[in-house]
Image (spheres, rainbow, N blue to C red):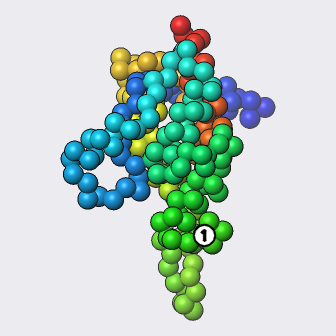
Amino acid sequence: MLKNINEVNKQVEPIYIKVSPTLPVLPQTLEDDLTKEQELALLTRCPKIYLSAETNLQQIIEFLIDLFSYYFELPKNMLTPESDLIDDIERQVWARELGVPYDDVTYGRIFCSKDDKGNIVGGIEDRGLMIATMFMLDFADLIGIKEVNNVSDATFEAANDEFGNYYDCNTISDLANLLYTVCMKLKDLA
């Protein structure tokens, strides 16, 4: 009974979502010694999308394949809708960056300390850190979906728990399906 009362009393806070065209960003793994002209030329190659009620799932999948290819500087033919964000994409980037074969990529822990006996303790695994960094820093600009502070700046209002979380997506296809739910919401509002 108490559980039911708590559920009734639980309020779902609204969030305000703004949908806009892609704001291009430079690839994550790019060297920092580019001229302004080189940066601008590269930014014109950034894949773009403007999610709308008319955007279909296949368009989102194709955009995400192009996006991950561009952002992580990977050959497009290496990516499919079922490419795992971490085990396929991130691992390929680490193999290239470290100059080792794909199968030799291993993960470690960061932010560790040592206990009294000198053993490494604590920290977090660095597996997935590259994808998480993309989601934290650039993904909202790249896909054109941002949370804003008020309804006047928003394309629509949604329940806080209405959409899933990027971090729960394992594959390009999973991520495309999540983004497509925004298009379905836009279609419902049209």
Give 105 or 101, whichever is nearer the viewer: 101
Extreme-right residue of the structure: 1
Residue found 63% across the figure and 72% down from its top: 104
Horizontal relation, residue 32 to residue 87: left or right: left
The correct choice, above or below, for 51 with respect to 88 in the image is above
Residue at figure coordinates x 51%, y 64% from the top left: 96
Query: Is 11 placed above or below 72 here?
Result: above
Q: Is residue 162 above or below residue 76?
A: above
Decide which of 154, 73 is in the foreground and name it.
Answer: 73
Q: Which residue sits furthest left?
A: 36
Q: Secondary structure at mark 1?
A: loop
Q: Position of residue 110 (x, y in %)?
A: 50, 70
Q: Is residue 77 visible?
A: yes
Classify residue 154 by image quadrant.
top left
Please state which of residues 26 and 13 is positioned toward the viewer in this rendering: 26
| Count of all numbered marks drawn on residues in the image | 1
Residue drawn at the location 57% of the way across and 59% of the way down: 92
Expressed as whole percent of the image width and height from the top left, the position of residue 32 reads 29, 58
Q: Quadrant of the N terminus?
A: top right
Residue type at the position of mark 1: Pro
Left or right of 118 on screen, residue 83: right
Q: Residue at x 65, y 47 (%)?
A: 83
Q: Which residue is mark 1?
A: 101
- Left or right: where does residue 5 sit relative to residue 148? right
Q: Position of residue 38 (x, y in %)?
A: 26, 47
Answer whether residue 17 is visible to the viewer in this image: no
Number of residues whose C-alpha sits closer than 10 Å to that of mark 1, classed few (under 14), some (14–19) or many (20 or more): few
Toward the bottom, the furthest residue is 117
* Residue 107 place in picture, x, y as percent: 59, 69
